[in-house]
Every structure is written in C-alpha cells, then in structure tokens.
Image (cartoon, helix red, strand yellow):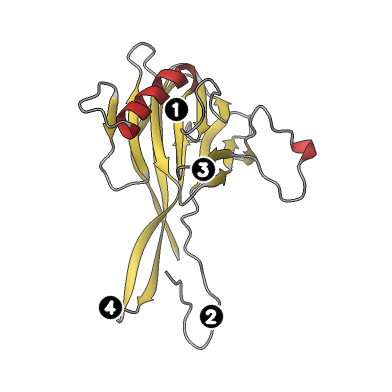
Amino acid sequence: MTVVQPRRVGTLRLPSGLLAVSGPDTGHGDGPHITVPVPPGEYVLDEARVRYSYHCEWRNAEVTTTQPTAVRLLVSDTPAATWEMAVGPQDDPRLFIERQTAGFVTDGATGCFADAGAWEPLIALFERGLVRGEPDLDGYEDIDDDSMFMQRTWDEVSGGEFVSFATTGDGIYPVRVGRCEAGEVTGVVVLVEGMPELLPERDGPLDAGV
C-alpha cells in the first residue's frame, strides 16, 4: 500500500470563523455535532488517498486501485505538531471508558463541513436539494468530480458554505484537530474508513482483499 498525494477538491468559505463538522441528518434546532473555531476565511478541502494492488479473481489478474481514506479542511500549511480528538458540547472525556471516542453521528452514511454561523439555512438548502429533489434550486449543487465530496450549498446572506462527504456507513465518526506548536489549528480531519482490510500473508504474497 502506498500513500499518494492528497487530492485537492475545492474550497469552503467560513465567514463566521466557526467550522461545523457533523452529520447533516440532525434535527432542526439541534445544531451541528461538533464545532471548531478557526479564523474567518476560505479554506481548502482535501481528500487523502492510498494506492494498493490485489488479485482480482474474476479478471484473473493483478489490479491496482486508488481509494480515499479521509477528508480534510486545511487551515494552514504549517505542519501539525499535535492532534486532538474534537468533542461536542455534551461530551466529557473524563467520563469516557477505555477506547471510547467522540465524534459526529450519521444515519445516512454522510458527514459535512459547514459554516456554523449559517447552519440552519445551509442544512435547509441541503434537504431541499437532495431529499426533496427541487429542480434548479438557488444555493445548491451536486459535486460531480468522482470524489468523496457530494453536495454543496451556500447562504447568500452570510456567504457561509456547506459541503457534504460520503462515509462508508452509519455510526460515529471521530474528528481530529491538528495544531501547530503555537497551538493554532492547522487542519481538521475525518477518517471515512476507506482503508482496505489487509489479510495476513499465508503461502503467497499479501492479499489486500476486496
């Protein structure tokens, strides 16, 4: 398995200076699961990828493929010195049992990055465009670039934006916040569990499996 260069997908505007990381299937009025303060601005969206090979039985040949493993909102090019688990307003790490983790919850295999200051109108546009399928909806578009990022909405009043991304299933997805040596946020990462399962080597070479 080889780690390849992150794929730059686009940007996200956060004029409020508060990043929301959440499942978009929250109840109205509940707000996002997790928020991370960042300087107001426009930030790059990346998709982390790995390349690996496996033996495809139906082709009877060695196949090489590239698969996404995580999505990131890049705040700064400064390398992260530390990584921490982001927690929501109801999370108290002091009460966590061993190996317990915080994160956002999704029942629709979907997460999102968004401007928390415009959360309600951005989520409303997402639901109107995706769930109700309203045609030619201002402030909504499907992202058609074969990446984990799927839909984008934008609020004309505040300038805040929202972008959804696919996960590999329902459940809780941890959010990691990278900080430089000075303690400032350099990036926010969500693992989308795209890592292929590696099987132990037996009589032949390592089989990555599918």
Pointer 3 residue: 190
Q: Position of residue 33 (x, y in %)?
A: 57, 31
Q: Is residue 67 above or below residue 45?
A: below
Toward the top, the furthest residue is 157
Pointer 4 residue: 59
Amino acid type assigned to the residue bearing label 2 in the image:
Glu
Figure quadrant of the N terminus: bottom left
Mark 4–mark 2 distance (CA, rounded to whole Å): 22 Å
Mark seen at residue 28:
none
Pointer 2 residue: 201
| Secondary structure state at the residue bearing disc 4 | loop
Q: Is residue 198 above or below residue 171?
A: below
Amino acid type assigned to the residue bearing label 3 in the image:
Val
Mark 2–mark 1 distance (CA, rounded to whole Å): 42 Å
Q: Position of residue 71 (x, y in %)?
A: 45, 43
Q: Position of residue 115 (x, y in %)?
A: 45, 23
Mark 1 vs mark 3: which is more N-terminal? 1
